Image (spheres, rainbow, N blue to C red):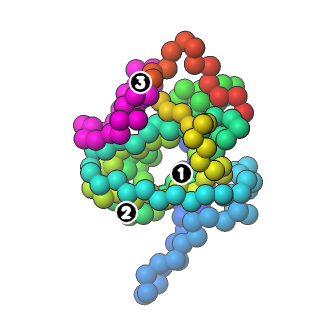
Amino acid sequence: MQFIETPLSGAYEVELSPFIDDRGLFARTFCKKEFTQIGFNKEIVQINHSLTKNKGTIRGLHYQVPPACEAKIIRCTQGQVFDVMVDLRADSPTFLKWHSVELSSDNMKMVYIPEGFAHGFQSLTDNVELIYYTSEFYTPECERGLKFDDPALMIKWPLTLSCISTKDKRHLIINDDFKGIFI
């Protein structure tokens, strides 16, 4: 595995190092020992799988607040997505900045998103599947979200929106009362 720093403090793109032979390939997608290189030493407590049927769908931007802030490792196993992370850590030099990475089954890239970030994605193909490794259990009372088209973020989604959940449509935009997450 190779960890590539993103412009957002503490967040990384992760490139796998597959072993390829006549049978196909083998790649390690998680190694606790290797992830300690970037300061991740928590346990993976939940692994989630999502299927997004339609190209242009946006999911997110989701996050959890203390005491259930979660780090995420995300990999696309089918299709292609425009994956977005937003730094919400109040004391971060990259507070309210966003970064995107194209994840696909072909490029086999992953992202490591630390605690205190929001995450979302837009499907660039039909039938996209993502695997999420998380450091915290899903905790509904700590769940929050940012509006995908928040003018304070100005995320440049690559496709016209085709589908979004009612819940994600209802997220509020960032206002002067938003002070970020204190971890």
Whole-percent x and y of residue 180? 62, 24
Please name the residue that numbered disc 1 is placed on: 111
What residue range appears in magenta? 147-171
Q: Amino acid at mark 3?
A: Asp
Whole-percent x and y of residue 31? 66, 65
**Magenta span includes 153:** yes
Q: Amino acid at mark 1?
A: Val
Whole-percent x and y of residue 58? 35, 41
The structure residue drawn at horizontal position 66% and vertical position 57%, both measured from the top left corner, is 45
CB atoms at circles 3 and 1 under 8 Å apart? no
Q: Point out which mark residue 150 bears.
A: 3
Please name the residue that numbered disc 2 is placed on: 78
Secondary structure mostly seen in magenta is: loop
Considering the numbered disc 1 on the image, is that residue within a helix, a strand or a loop? Answer: strand
Q: Earlier in the sequence, mark 1 or mark 2?
A: 2
The image quarter in which residue 43 lies: bottom right
How far apart are the alpha carbons under marks 3 and 2? 28 Å
